[in-house]
Amino acid sequence: MINVSIVEDDNEIRESLALLINGTPGYACIHTFNDCESATKEIIEDPPDVVLMDIGLPGISGIEGVRKIKQKLPEIDILMLTVHNDSKKVFEALCAGACGYLIKDTPPARLLEAISEVHNGGAPMSTQIARMVVNSFKTNPHSDLTRRETEVLSQLCKGKSYKMIADALFISEETVRRHIKNIYRKLEVSSKSEAVAKALKERIVNS
């Protein structure tokens, strides 16, 4: 069972998401909130597996909410679900600690799949977001990463899980894990969201 919390100020969207999650075997919506102030306190006290977080919220923004929750619960998976699709918002969300980024018109089946992906170590993004994120940056020729490590990081930036990266590059999941460990060490980061954020900031990957 994947327990989900929803932070969304639009009542209709929030209720629809809760109905979708509760109506799907293997998923449960355990909290719904319309602002980050109330969400942060309760999520920290009673953590779900995955948080669906809007950005444009009354009071503190979803990005700041992610930052506050991740400070207390660094291992929690937070998936942004928002109308914002500009690179600045994507970058800020990833830097704050978000593990994935979906647009609100994402089909229900894809949303459920993304919740499962993020729970299993992936970093799902809407197709247009992934394309924008990866294609907006050119490779930094001064990167310390090897060619293979750069390929792995590029796949990570596209939202791929370890298994999907292994399949795409024709290597084992264990090899993927070893490369990612080296990537974390070289980039001086400790999570996939930090690695993706740094890859974008320093232009380490391209398409």
Image (tube, rainbow, N blue to C red):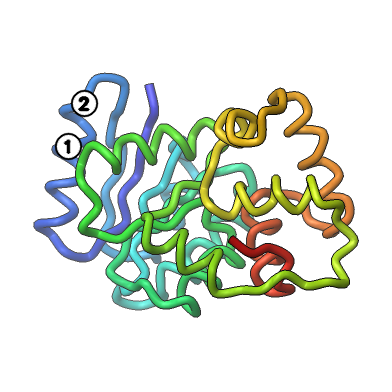
**Secondary element at image label 2:** loop
Front position in the image: 108 or 77: 108
Q: Residue at x 85, y 66 (%)?
A: 143
Horizontal relation, residue 83 to residue 173: left or right: left
* 2 to 71, vertically: above or below: above
Q: Which residue is labeled 1 in the image? A: 20
Name which quarter of the figure residue 41 lies in: bottom left
Q: Position of residue 115 (x, y in %)?
A: 38, 38
Residue 187 is labelled as none
Horizontal relation, residue 158 to residue 185: left or right: left
* 71 to 60, vertically: above or below: above
Q: Position of residue 70 (x, y in %)?
A: 59, 55
Q: Position of residue 135 (x, y in %)?
A: 54, 68
Q: Residue at x 68, y 63 (%)?
A: 205
Horizontal relation, residue 183 to residue 61: left or right: right
Q: Which residue is labeled 2 in the image? A: 24
Horizontal relation, residue 4 to residue 136: left or right: left
Q: Residue at x 29, y 30 (%)?
A: 28
Furthest toward the left, the residue is: 12
Report how far apart the C-alphas of labels 1 and 2 lie in the structure. Answer: 6 Å
Front position in the image: 110 or 69: 110
| Amino acid type of the residue tagged 2 in the rendering | Thr
Callout 1 touching callout 2 (CB < 8 Å): yes
